[in-house]
Every structure is written in structure tokens, then in C-alpha cells.
Amino acid sequence: MADTVSSVQSHYGSDDLTGQILRALEGAGQDLANPNAETFYPADQLHGGGLNTTKRQAELAAIPDGARVLDAGCGIGGSSRFLAQNFGCRVEAMDLTQDYVDAAKALTEMCGLETQINYRQGDITELPFDDQSFDLVWCQNVTMNIEDKPRLFGEVFRVLRPGGRYAFSHAAGTGTGAPYYPLPWAREPHYSFLETEDRILGWLQDTGFQVLENANEADSFGSAKRPTVDLGRFSVMGEDMPERGANTQRSIADGRIKGMIVVAGRPD
Ligand SMILES: C[S@@+](CC[C@H](N)C(=O)[O-])C[C@H]1O[C@@H](n2cnc3c(N)ncnc32)[C@H](O)[C@@H]1O
């Protein structure tokens, strides 16, 4: 477990990330004078499918205006800002990687969204929140780094109010062979934990969730449309992302992994 935590943190972490992001966006001609959430979308959507997947997940989750949301594994805050700006959500956001939390805070303050979003560092398998605190738990491409998924699902269930929803996207295994490494979420297999769709849905049901949506859309994972702002080789997740992204595509094409967007409800 400790080994997984440190592997994940060093996989994602990077010095002066906020400075790197601002320089990359400025170099690509992005106007940073009066930023809002959209300003950072070309850099901050750290999941296959990019902003399209975020929008699709939000549509499937049917988010009520002003929802209380937990963004579990928030990265640098791309989804938190999207949810705060577009749905008036009040967001608690948490991530294991301190460098990402620092960048998330800095970018959010630049947008003036800091009164709606609160970031903290931490492990989402041990949530520091009261029972029934949230209307929605939101999670994008995090569970591939989490070995004990039943524990995560139990924690998510606990902090959701009855009638609340857990919306997540991720890559599942298919049981037909290992994917090709390095991948976006792991350069080596020892901190990548892919489970089959059947096991994931079974654990959700065992926890008490009802599965409301299970979208296995071909473009929900790995086929991120190029952002309109071209950042060249820059990626928050590292300059080797083209190779890692190509390995995702190859693993999907060979039937070794698949993208899923799931919405599960805690019954009333
Ligand atoms: C691929 S990034 C996705 C970030 C964000 N959800 C997004 O889509 O932009 C995966 C994130 O999961 C975080 N993560 C992995 N395991 C975690 C854990 N146990 N608790 C909290 N965050 C975790 C990583 O630090 C990283 O920021």
C-alpha cells in the first residue's frame, strides 16, 4: 500500500506545475488576462476523451444545480472547475498528489472559483467527511490506481446522502491479457489495478448501489479529441504522454482494456 502511494505520487508529481501550465498556455496564445474554467481546459482534463468525457459524464449523472460534490482524485481541478462554473456546484476535492493539489488551488484562485471549491491532499479510500455529506461523488480515471475498490466504493456510499449518485469513468480490464505499458496512469504494472466490468458492477451492487448507467462508449476513453489550443509536447502528465496514450489505444484495439462511464445511485 505505502509502495502504491509513493509510486502514484511520483508518477503524477512534477515541480512548478502551475508555472509549467501557464507558460504552455501562454506559449500557445491562450489569453490569461481574465481566466475562467474554460481557459485551462486544454491542459487540465487528465483523462481519455478529455472535456468530451467530462461533459458526457455530467449528462449521465443528471447533476442538480448547486449540488454538493466530492471530486475524488481531482487531479489539477479540471472537473471541479467545470462543475462549479456550469452547475453552481459546491465542491470538496481531494487528491493523493500534493503537486496536483497545489496547481488545482492556484488555477482555481485565478478563476475566482475558490469560494466554491475546497482542495485537500489525501487518499480517497479514507475519506475525512461525515456520513451523507454529498449529493454526488465524481471520479475520473482514478480507480485504475486503487487496489482495494470495494473499500473505495464503501467510503463513497457512506458519504453520499440517500438518493445521491456516484459517477465515475475509468478503464476496466477485460481478462484477455495485460495492457501495454507504459500507460497514462502507470508506467509499470505494479501500481495499475484493472478489474473486469463484471467484478466492478458486482462490487457496486454488493455495497448497496443501484447501477443507473453503464456507458461503454467507444469514444469515452483514450480517444481524446485534440484540444483547440495546441500545447505541443506539453502535458501535465509528462512529455511521454504520446507514447502512453498510444499504448491505451493499442490496448483498447486489442480488446485488453475498455472505457466505462458508470453512474450508481445510493437508494433513498
Ligand atoms: C489520471 S489522473 C485524473 C485526475 C482527474 N480526475 C482528471 O480527470 O483530470 C489520476 C489522479 O488520481 C489520483 N489518485 C490516484 N490514487 C488516488 C488515491 N488513492 N486517492 C486520491 N487520489 C488518487 C492521482 O494523484 C491523480 O491525480
Image (cartoon, rainbow, N blue to C red):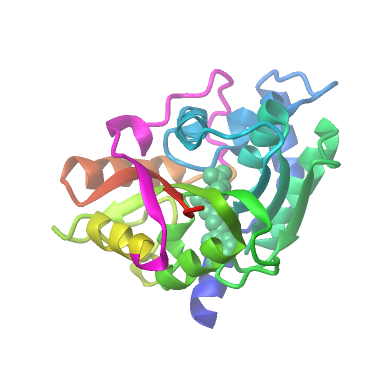
Q: Which residues are magenta?
A: 206-235
Looking at the picture, tell me which residue is in the foreground, 29 or 189. 189
Image spot of residue 147 (x, y percent):
41, 71
Q: Residue furthest front?
A: 268
Q: For this view, does 63 lie left or right of residue 88?
A: left
219 inside magenta stretch: yes
Give the residue at x 42% y 33%.
49
Marker count (numbered): 0
Above-or-below relation of 86 to 208: above
Q: Point out residue 101 in the picture as x, y percentages from the top left corner.
A: 72, 55
Left/right placement of residue 84 relative to residue 156 reads right
Return the residue found at the far bottom. 2
Q: Identify the residue shown where x is 75% and y is 54%.
A: 119
Q: Residue at x 84, y 21 (%)?
A: 34
Q: Is residue 38 left or right of residue 47?
A: right
Q: Is residue 241 left or right of residue 130?
A: left
Percent across and percent down for residue 139 are 52, 50
Residue 145 seen in this snapshot:
yes
The picture quadrant where one finds residue 236 is top right
Residue 225, horizontal then vertical, whole percent? 43, 25
Q: Residue at x 70, y 62 (%)?
A: 98
Q: For ligand 1, which image quadrant applies?
A: bottom right
Reply above or below: 7 against 244. below
Say which of 48 and 21 sits in front. Answer: 48
Q: Is residue 138 visible?
A: no
For the residue pair 86 and 234, the one nearer the viewer reads as 86
Up-down relation of residue 182 to residue 82 (above or below)? below
Answer with the quarter of the image where residue 207 lies: bottom left
Can residue 257 be found in the magenta stretch?
no
Position above or below: 208 against 227: below
Name the dominant secondary structure of the magenta segment: loop
